[in-house]
Image (cartoon, rainbow, N blue to C red):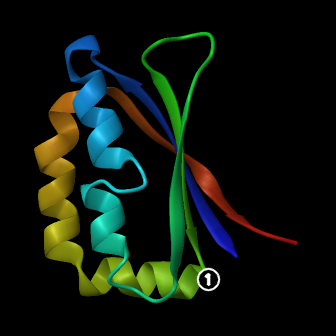
């Protein structure tokens, strides 16, 4: 398994929309579900900060994730721009392989 981990700080006026779009049934997840190699997205909300989130996208492998991104580059970029207004901060923490 391969996980891509993101850290978000969301503008207070967009918290509800962010949770909908980035949650397990949101727009990103629906896009990723086009791949049989996608295993799910897991959105976590901070206990300490009302606008802080971790998002973990899980794939079979790094290559399946990268291949998907290449194949769907245009829509991936379009969605990124569409939802950019939600973020005060968007940071890729890293990518991890399970042991």
Q: Residue at point 39% right, 86% down?
A: 35
Dividing the picture into quadrants, the one containing residue 16 is: top left
- Furthest toward the front, the residue is 25
Dividing the picture into quadrants, the one containing residue 2 is: bottom right
Whole-percent x, y for residue 53 in the image: 50, 30
Q: Nearer the viewer, residue 74 or 58?
A: 58
Q: Residue at point 58% right, 79% down?
A: 62
Dividing the picture into quadrants, the one containing residue 87 is: top left
Q: Quadrant of the C terminus?
A: bottom right
Within 10 angstroms of label 1, few (less than 14), some, or many (20 or more) residues?
Answer: some
What residue is pinned by disc 1? 60
Secondary structure beneath dot 1 equals loop
Name the side, left or right, on which 73 lies relative to 44: left
Q: Nearer the viewer, residue 53 or 93?
A: 53
Q: Residue at point 48% right, 78% down?
A: 65
Whole-percent x, y for residue 33 in the image: 37, 77
């Amino acid at each position: 398994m391969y996980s891509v981990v993101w850290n978000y700080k969301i503008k207070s006026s967009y918290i509800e929309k962010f949770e909908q779009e980035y949650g397990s049934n949101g727009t990103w997840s629906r896009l990723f579900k086009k791949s049989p190699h996608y295993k799910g997205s897991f959105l976590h909300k901070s206990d300490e900060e009302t606008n802080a989130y971790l998002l973990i996208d899980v794939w079979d492998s790094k290559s399946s994730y990268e291949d998907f991104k290449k194949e769907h580059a245009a829509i991936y970029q379009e969605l990124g721009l569409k939802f950019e207004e939600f973020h005060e901060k968007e940071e890729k923490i890293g990518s991890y392989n399970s042991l």
